[in-house]
Image: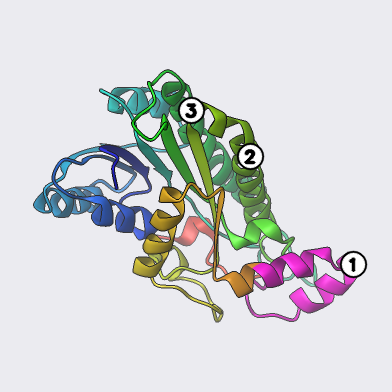
């Protein structure tokens, strides 16, 4: 990779951690953000051992002011790559006596705050900075990659707010990229299935097409370097999900509500997670 300054949110674990370790090399400057300081420090130490100049910042992506300040500080002399990996997941509570299932209002708002607003708090300051940068030898001003989800292409009854937040992120990146690429800023949305990270460790259901973090990182980096607008994997799962979303709603629901994947009550509530 030709870039020299890389900023990653959610870098203390999962895909963010995997990207940091994969990109760490002599001459690369890494700015790693996350909420878990001890884990972030461990990732930074591993990156420094591989020769990368590494700075860390413990912060919450939902704080727009703190994010803008951090990203601004990191952009010296320029900002080449940004990976927005911070995210959470969750689903509806177990069905009640009526057989109905709902997410708590607090969970819905937290999901949107982290998965949508947190992504925008990363994307928008980075876009502003990159627009003012000179183009490099390849005509680029920078590249921004956001981790969306296969959930963003379906309306899964068990995970409504997660689906909605990821759909918004994916559509924003794909639509915005049509014009931003003319300015040399390339946007990538990653619509992936289940990746073997701590975020899915508490799932109480089988996860079809589970991909290792290492494989996910390779696919993401390859897609970003090829300036792909959308990176999808596993392909069969994403294509199948797109097909399901074209069916009549009642027919799709008949299938979804019979699947253990994301069934109401299958997720550990956010307030019970470590």
Q: Residue furthest top?
A: 132
Label 3, label 1: how many angstroms apart (C-alpha)? 38 Å
* Residue shown at the point (13%, 45%) measured from the top left: 26
Name the colouring of the figure. Answer: rainbow
Sequence order check, earlier mark of 2 and 1: 2
Sequence order check, earlier mark of 3 and 1: 3
Most frequent secondary structure within the magenta stretch: helix
In magenta segment, residue 45: no
User: Relative to 30, is 137 above or below?
Assistant: above
Pointer 3 local density, CA inside 10 Å: few below 14, some 14–19, many at least 20:
many
Counting from the top left corner in percent of width and height, residue 194 is at: 51, 69
Q: Quadrant of residue 197?
A: bottom left
* Residue shown at the point (66%, 61%) measured from the top left: 159
What span is colored magenta in the figure?
A: 239-263
Counting from the top left corner in percent of width and height, residue 56 is at: 23, 39
Counting from the top left corner in percent of width and height, residue 253 is at: 82, 71
Q: Mark 2 highlights which residue?
A: 172
In magenta segment, residue 256: yes
Query: The residue tagged with tag 2: helix, strand or loop?
Result: helix
* Side of 149 where 17 appears, left or right: left
């Amino acid at each position: 990779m030709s870039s020299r300054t890389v900023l990653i949110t959610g870098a203390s674990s999962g895909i963010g951690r995997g990207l940091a370790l994969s990109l760490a090399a002599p001459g690369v400057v890494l700015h790693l953000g996350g909420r878990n300081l001890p884990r972030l420090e461990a990732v930074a130490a591993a990156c420094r051992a591989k020769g990368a100049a590494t700075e860390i910042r413990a912060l919450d992506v939902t704080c727009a002011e703190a994010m803008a300040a951090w990203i601004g500080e990191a952009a010296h002399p320029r900002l080449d790559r940004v990976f927005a990996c911070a995210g959470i997941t969750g689903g509806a509570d177990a069905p009640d006596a009526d057989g109905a299932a709902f997410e708590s209002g607090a969970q819905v708002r937290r999901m949107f705050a982290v998965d949508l607003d947190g992504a925008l708090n990363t994307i928008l300051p980075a876009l502003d900075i990159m627009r003012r940068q000179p183009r490099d030898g390849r005509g680029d001003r920078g590249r921004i990659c956001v981790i969306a989800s296969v959930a963003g292409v379906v309306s899964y009854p068990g995970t409504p707010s997660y689906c909605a937040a990821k759909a918004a992120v994916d559509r924003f990146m794909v639509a915005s990229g049509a014009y931003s690429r003319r300015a040399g800023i390339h946007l990538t949305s990653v619509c992936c299935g289940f990746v073997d990270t701590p975020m899915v460790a508490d799932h109480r259901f089988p996860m079809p097409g589970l991909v290792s973090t290492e494989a996910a990182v390779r696919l993401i980096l390859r897609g970003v370097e090829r300036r792909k607008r959308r990176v999808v994997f596993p392909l069969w799962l994403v294509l199948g999900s797109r097909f399901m979303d074209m069916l009549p709603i009642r027919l799709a629901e008949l299938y979804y509500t019979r699947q253990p994947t994301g069934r109401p009550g299958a997720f550990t509530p956010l307030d019970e997670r470590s």
